[in-house]
Image (cartoon, rainbow, N blue to C red):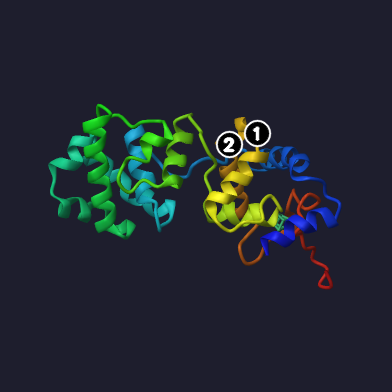
């Protein structure tokens, strides 16, 4: 399906990806000027823990849990000063709490042993933390002002395909396609723009193309005419 949207963009004469990306970013930035990470955090460490907790759950759910969590745990040492079970109870509501508690404690250990207790900003370093995969590392690096890639989550994947910016399904290949066309200066904000557009307009099941600012740039646009 993704493949057909790349071809469809050409068929509809919408222009090449590189030509469309500028107006796409511009219009989304205007439409979603409030687009930013939905997780709430006050420090690099809280950012890292929030992003780790957000796997397989919503940001809203994480934000419900973290105020009490961050009131109790301030430094990497604090996560290691309690038992695995105690941390599991404190993050229980985010789901997959056993694996997450194990990953968080493992990461805190590496932070202390290898990074003086600080959250690193290089992808290679972030990827050394247990339980931190490319998506988490990308989010953390971008929020710390050191984007080295483009975050690909479910919204970014769906919208990139619908907009004919990629013909791939695999997040790593999608990221590579996006890196080729999205200007580097926009790598950090681009995923937020797609995520908010995906939530507000380009719904997975019912995209509201009639209300979409990208309708003339999008190869999968449908209008309300039932024949279209
Ligand atoms: S035109 Fe429709 S399919 Fe394309 S981005 Fe907008 S809402 Fe999504």
Q: Quadrant of the C terminus?
A: bottom right
Label 1 Cα crowd, 10 Å radius (few <14 / some 14-19 / many 20+): some
Residue 48 visible in rendering: yes
List the single residue furthest toward the top: 116
- Residue 31 located left or right of residue 142: right
Q: Quadrant of residue 31?
A: top right
Provide the residue designation for mark 1: 183
Q: Residue at x 22, y 32 (%)?
A: 112
Q: Residue at x 65, y 38 (%)?
A: 182
Question: Residue 212 appears at what percent x and percent y?
Answer: 73, 53
Q: Nearer the viewer, residue 125 or 44?
A: 125
Residue 201 visible in rendering: no
Q: Secondary structure at mark 2?
A: loop
Ligand 1 within 8 Å of disc 2? The answer is no
Question: Residue 15 appears at what percent x and percent y?
Answer: 82, 46
Q: Is residue 198 above or below residue 151?
A: below
Looking at the image, in which quadrant does ligand 1 appear? bottom right
Q: Nearer the viewer, residue 39 or 164?
A: 164
Q: Is residue 46 above or below residue 205?
A: above
Q: Is residue 35 above or below residue 228?
A: above
Q: Secondary structure at mark 1?
A: loop
Q: Quadrant of the N terminus?
A: bottom right
- Residue 55 located left or right of residue 228: left
For the residues labelled 1 and 2, the Cα–Cα distance comes to: 7 Å
Question: Residue 12 appears at what percent x and percent y?
Answer: 85, 56
The label on residue 187 is: 2
Asked if labels 2 and 1 touch by Cβ distance under 8 angstroms, the answer is yes
Q: Residue at x 24, y 58 (%)?
A: 98
Q: Quadrant of residue 4?
A: bottom right
Q: Residue at x 69, y 49 (%)?
A: 165
């Amino acid at each position: 399906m993704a493949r057909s949207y790349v071809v469809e963009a050409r068929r509809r004469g919408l222009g090449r990806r590189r030509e469309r990306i500028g107006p796409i970013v511009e219009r989304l930035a205007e439409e979603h000027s409030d687009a930013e990470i939905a997780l709430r955090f006050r420090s690099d460490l809280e950012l890292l823990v929030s992003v780790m907790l957000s796997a397989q759950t919503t940001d809203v759910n994480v934000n419900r849990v973290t105020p009490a969590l961050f009131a109790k745990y301030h430094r990497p040492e604090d996560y290691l000063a309690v038992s695995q079970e105690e941390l599991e109870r404190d993050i229980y509501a985010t789901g997959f709490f056993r694996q997450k508690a194990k990953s968080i404690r493992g990461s805190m250990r590496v932070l202390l042993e290898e990074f003086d207790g600080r959250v690193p900003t290089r992808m290679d370093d972030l990827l050394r933390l247990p339980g931190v995969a490319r998506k988490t590392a990308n989010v953390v690096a971008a929020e710390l002002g050191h984007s080295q890639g483009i975050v690909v989550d479910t919204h970014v994947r769906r919208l990139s395909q619908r907009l004919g910016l990629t013909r791939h399904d695999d997040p790593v290949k999608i990221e590579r396609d996006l890196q080729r066309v999205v200007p580097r200066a926009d790598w950090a904000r681009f995923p937020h723009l797609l995520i908010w557009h995906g939530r507000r307009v380009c719904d997975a099941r019912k995209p509201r193309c009639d209300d979409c600012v990208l309708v003339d740039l999008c190869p999968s646009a449908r209008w309300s005419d039932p024949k279209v």
